Image (spheres, rainbow, N blue to C red):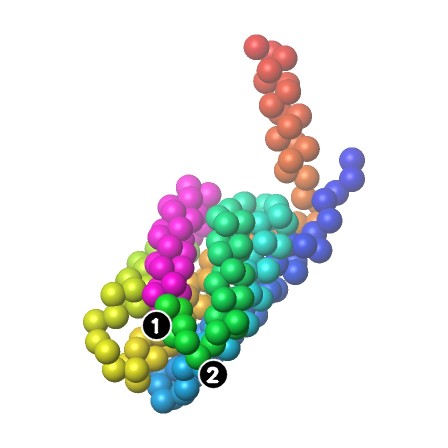
Amino acid sequence: MKNRCTAPMRAAKAGYIIMSLVFCGAGALFIARPELSAAAISRALGAAMILFGAIKLVGYFSKDLFRLAFQYDLGFGLLLIALGALVLARPAQVLGFILTALGVAILTDGLFKVQIAMDSRQFGISSWWLTLVLAIVTSAAGLALVFRPWDSVRLLTALLGAALLAEGVLNLCVTVSTVKIVDHQRPDVIEAATFMADGQRK
Protein backbone atom coordinates (compact mmCIF):
# COMPACT_ATOMS: atom_id res chain seq x y z
CA MET A 1 0.00 0.00 0.00
CA LYS A 2 1.51 3.31 -1.09
CA ASN A 3 2.27 5.91 1.55
CA ARG A 4 0.89 9.42 1.21
CA CYS A 5 3.28 12.05 -0.06
CA THR A 6 4.27 14.28 2.85
CA ALA A 7 5.70 17.13 0.74
CA PRO A 8 2.50 19.26 0.87
CA MET A 9 2.31 18.82 4.65
CA ARG A 10 5.95 19.79 5.11
CA ALA A 11 5.52 22.80 2.80
CA ALA A 12 2.38 23.92 4.64
CA LYS A 13 3.98 23.51 8.07
CA ALA A 14 7.13 25.39 7.01
CA GLY A 15 5.01 28.09 5.38
CA TYR A 16 2.89 28.47 8.51
CA ILE A 17 5.97 28.82 10.68
CA ILE A 18 7.58 31.36 8.35
CA MET A 19 4.41 33.45 8.01
CA SER A 20 3.85 33.32 11.77
CA LEU A 21 7.34 34.74 12.26
CA VAL A 22 6.64 37.36 9.57
CA PHE A 23 3.48 38.44 11.40
CA CYS A 24 5.38 38.59 14.67
CA GLY A 25 8.07 40.73 13.04
CA ALA A 26 5.53 43.00 11.35
CA GLY A 27 3.62 43.36 14.61
CA ALA A 28 6.76 44.32 16.50
CA LEU A 29 7.67 46.81 13.75
CA PHE A 30 4.23 48.47 13.82
CA ILE A 31 4.40 48.76 17.62
CA ALA A 32 7.89 50.26 17.50
CA ARG A 33 7.22 52.48 14.44
CA PRO A 34 3.55 53.56 14.57
CA GLU A 35 4.34 56.54 12.32
CA LEU A 36 4.66 54.32 9.22
CA SER A 37 2.58 55.48 6.26
CA ALA A 38 -0.82 53.97 5.56
CA ALA A 39 0.24 53.00 2.02
CA ALA A 40 3.33 51.14 3.25
CA ILE A 41 1.33 49.30 5.90
CA SER A 42 -1.39 48.37 3.41
CA ARG A 43 1.05 47.06 0.79
CA ALA A 44 2.90 44.95 3.34
CA LEU A 45 -0.32 43.53 4.77
CA GLY A 46 -1.80 42.90 1.32
CA ALA A 47 1.17 40.88 0.16
CA ALA A 48 1.34 38.97 3.46
CA MET A 49 -2.37 38.10 3.35
CA ILE A 50 -2.17 36.75 -0.21
CA LEU A 51 0.85 34.63 0.63
CA PHE A 52 -0.61 33.35 3.88
CA GLY A 53 -3.92 32.62 2.16
CA ALA A 54 -2.12 30.47 -0.41
CA ILE A 55 -0.27 28.63 2.37
CA LYS A 56 -3.57 27.99 4.15
CA LEU A 57 -4.99 26.40 1.00
CA VAL A 58 -1.95 24.11 0.74
CA GLY A 59 -2.39 23.22 4.40
CA TYR A 60 -6.08 22.42 3.99
CA PHE A 61 -5.45 19.98 1.15
CA SER A 62 -2.33 18.43 2.69
CA LYS A 63 -4.27 16.18 5.13
CA ASP A 64 -1.85 16.15 8.03
CA LEU A 65 -2.12 13.47 10.69
CA PHE A 66 -4.33 15.15 13.32
CA ARG A 67 -6.29 17.40 10.90
CA LEU A 68 -6.43 20.16 13.52
CA ALA A 69 -4.41 23.19 12.43
CA PHE A 70 -5.69 23.35 8.85
CA GLN A 71 -9.30 22.22 9.23
CA TYR A 72 -10.85 25.69 8.68
CA ASP A 73 -8.33 26.95 6.14
CA LEU A 74 -10.22 26.53 2.85
CA GLY A 75 -12.62 29.42 3.30
CA PHE A 76 -10.20 31.41 5.44
CA GLY A 77 -7.43 31.09 2.88
CA LEU A 78 -9.70 32.28 0.06
CA LEU A 79 -10.83 35.21 2.22
CA LEU A 80 -7.26 36.30 2.92
CA ILE A 81 -6.34 36.15 -0.77
CA ALA A 82 -9.37 38.27 -1.71
CA LEU A 83 -8.67 40.84 1.01
CA GLY A 84 -4.98 40.99 0.12
CA ALA A 85 -5.77 41.61 -3.55
CA LEU A 86 -8.17 44.41 -2.62
CA VAL A 87 -5.59 46.05 -0.37
CA LEU A 88 -2.87 45.90 -3.03
CA ALA A 89 -5.22 47.37 -5.62
CA ARG A 90 -5.87 50.50 -3.53
CA PRO A 91 -3.26 50.63 -0.76
CA ALA A 92 -3.64 54.28 0.22
CA GLN A 93 -7.44 54.42 0.37
CA VAL A 94 -8.40 51.35 2.38
CA LEU A 95 -6.54 51.54 5.70
CA GLY A 96 -9.76 51.98 7.67
CA PHE A 97 -11.35 49.11 5.80
CA ILE A 98 -8.33 46.87 6.18
CA LEU A 99 -8.20 47.48 9.93
CA THR A 100 -11.83 46.37 10.23
CA ALA A 101 -11.46 43.46 7.81
CA LEU A 102 -8.23 42.28 9.39
CA GLY A 103 -9.79 42.65 12.82
CA VAL A 104 -12.69 40.42 11.77
CA ALA A 105 -10.25 37.90 10.25
CA ILE A 106 -8.08 37.83 13.40
CA LEU A 107 -11.14 37.58 15.64
CA THR A 108 -12.52 34.72 13.54
CA ASP A 109 -9.19 32.91 13.49
CA GLY A 110 -8.88 33.30 17.25
CA LEU A 111 -12.34 31.79 17.78
CA PHE A 112 -11.51 28.90 15.45
CA LYS A 113 -8.33 28.33 17.42
CA VAL A 114 -10.43 28.08 20.60
CA GLN A 115 -12.15 25.11 18.99
CA ILE A 116 -8.78 23.70 17.93
CA ALA A 117 -7.58 24.01 21.53
CA MET A 118 -10.58 21.99 22.72
CA ASP A 119 -9.98 19.39 20.02
CA SER A 120 -6.28 19.28 20.97
CA ARG A 121 -7.26 18.47 24.54
CA GLN A 122 -9.25 15.47 23.31
CA PHE A 123 -6.24 14.35 21.27
CA GLY A 124 -4.13 14.45 24.43
CA ILE A 125 -1.90 17.35 23.30
CA SER A 126 -0.44 18.76 26.52
CA SER A 127 -0.10 22.36 25.28
CA TRP A 128 -3.82 22.74 24.49
CA TRP A 129 -4.21 25.24 27.35
CA LEU A 130 -1.54 27.52 25.87
CA THR A 131 -3.35 27.50 22.54
CA LEU A 132 -6.57 28.37 24.37
CA VAL A 133 -5.02 31.32 26.23
CA LEU A 134 -3.36 32.66 23.07
CA ALA A 135 -6.61 32.23 21.11
CA ILE A 136 -8.53 34.27 23.68
CA VAL A 137 -5.90 37.03 23.68
CA THR A 138 -5.85 37.07 19.85
CA SER A 139 -9.65 37.21 19.67
CA ALA A 140 -9.65 40.20 22.04
CA ALA A 141 -7.04 41.97 19.89
CA GLY A 142 -9.09 41.31 16.75
CA LEU A 143 -12.22 42.62 18.47
CA ALA A 144 -10.37 45.80 19.45
CA LEU A 145 -9.35 46.30 15.81
CA VAL A 146 -12.96 46.00 14.70
CA PHE A 147 -14.31 48.59 17.16
CA ARG A 148 -11.16 50.80 17.22
CA PRO A 149 -11.60 52.54 20.61
CA TRP A 150 -9.57 55.59 19.52
CA ASP A 151 -8.98 57.67 16.37
CA SER A 152 -5.24 58.29 16.61
CA VAL A 153 -3.46 56.73 13.62
CA ARG A 154 -0.36 56.04 15.70
CA LEU A 155 -2.36 54.23 18.37
CA LEU A 156 -4.28 52.28 15.74
CA THR A 157 -1.02 51.24 14.08
CA ALA A 158 0.32 50.08 17.44
CA LEU A 159 -2.94 48.17 18.05
CA LEU A 160 -2.60 46.58 14.62
CA GLY A 161 0.93 45.56 15.54
CA ALA A 162 -0.25 43.99 18.79
CA ALA A 163 -2.97 42.06 16.95
CA LEU A 164 -0.52 40.80 14.32
CA LEU A 165 1.97 39.80 17.01
CA ALA A 166 -0.72 37.87 18.86
CA GLU A 167 -1.86 36.20 15.64
CA GLY A 168 1.68 35.22 14.75
CA VAL A 169 2.42 33.71 18.16
CA LEU A 170 -0.92 31.85 18.12
CA ASN A 171 -0.35 30.32 14.69
CA LEU A 172 3.20 29.38 15.60
CA CYS A 173 2.00 27.61 18.73
CA VAL A 174 -0.77 25.75 16.89
CA THR A 175 1.51 24.69 14.04
CA VAL A 176 4.31 23.40 16.26
CA SER A 177 1.99 21.56 18.66
CA THR A 178 -0.64 20.06 16.34
CA VAL A 179 0.88 19.49 12.87
CA LYS A 180 2.41 16.03 13.02
CA ILE A 181 4.00 14.47 9.95
CA VAL A 182 4.90 10.79 9.68
CA ASP A 183 6.48 9.26 6.59
CA HIS A 184 4.22 6.19 6.60
CA GLN A 185 0.96 8.11 7.07
CA ARG A 186 -2.08 6.42 5.48
CA PRO A 187 -5.08 7.54 7.55
CA ASP A 188 -7.62 7.85 4.73
CA VAL A 189 -7.05 4.27 3.54
CA ILE A 190 -7.22 2.95 7.07
CA GLU A 191 -10.36 4.91 7.88
CA ALA A 192 -12.07 3.78 4.68
CA ALA A 193 -11.19 0.13 5.30
CA THR A 194 -12.44 0.33 8.88
CA PHE A 195 -15.70 1.93 7.76
CA MET A 196 -16.29 -0.77 5.15
CA ALA A 197 -15.50 -3.53 7.63
CA ASP A 198 -17.93 -2.07 10.16
CA GLY A 199 -20.60 -1.88 7.48
CA GLN A 200 -20.11 -5.50 6.51
CA ARG A 201 -20.37 -6.66 10.14
CA LYS A 202 -23.66 -4.82 10.47
**Where on the picture, by quarter, is residue 140?**
bottom left
**For the stretch drawn in magenta, what is the main secondary structure?**
helix
Mark 1 vs mark 2, CA separation in Å: 14 Å
Numbered mark located on residue 96 in the image: 1
Q: Give the residue at the far top of this rendering.
A: 202
Task: Work out which quarter of the rendered image holds the N terminus and state it.
Answer: top right
**Where on the picture, by quarter, is residue 164?**
bottom left
Which residue is at a point 73% across and 49% down the rendered structure image? Answer: 5
Residue 72 seen anywhere in this rendered image of the structure: yes
Q: Which residues are magenta?
A: 99-126
Task: Work out which quarter of the rendered image holds the C terminus and state it.
Answer: top right
| Residue type at the position of mark 2 | Ala
Residue 130 seen anywhere in this rendered image of the structure: no
Q: Report which residue position mark 2 lands on.
A: 40
What kind of element bears circle 2? Answer: helix
- Total of numbered circles in the picture? 2
What kind of element bears circle 1? Answer: helix
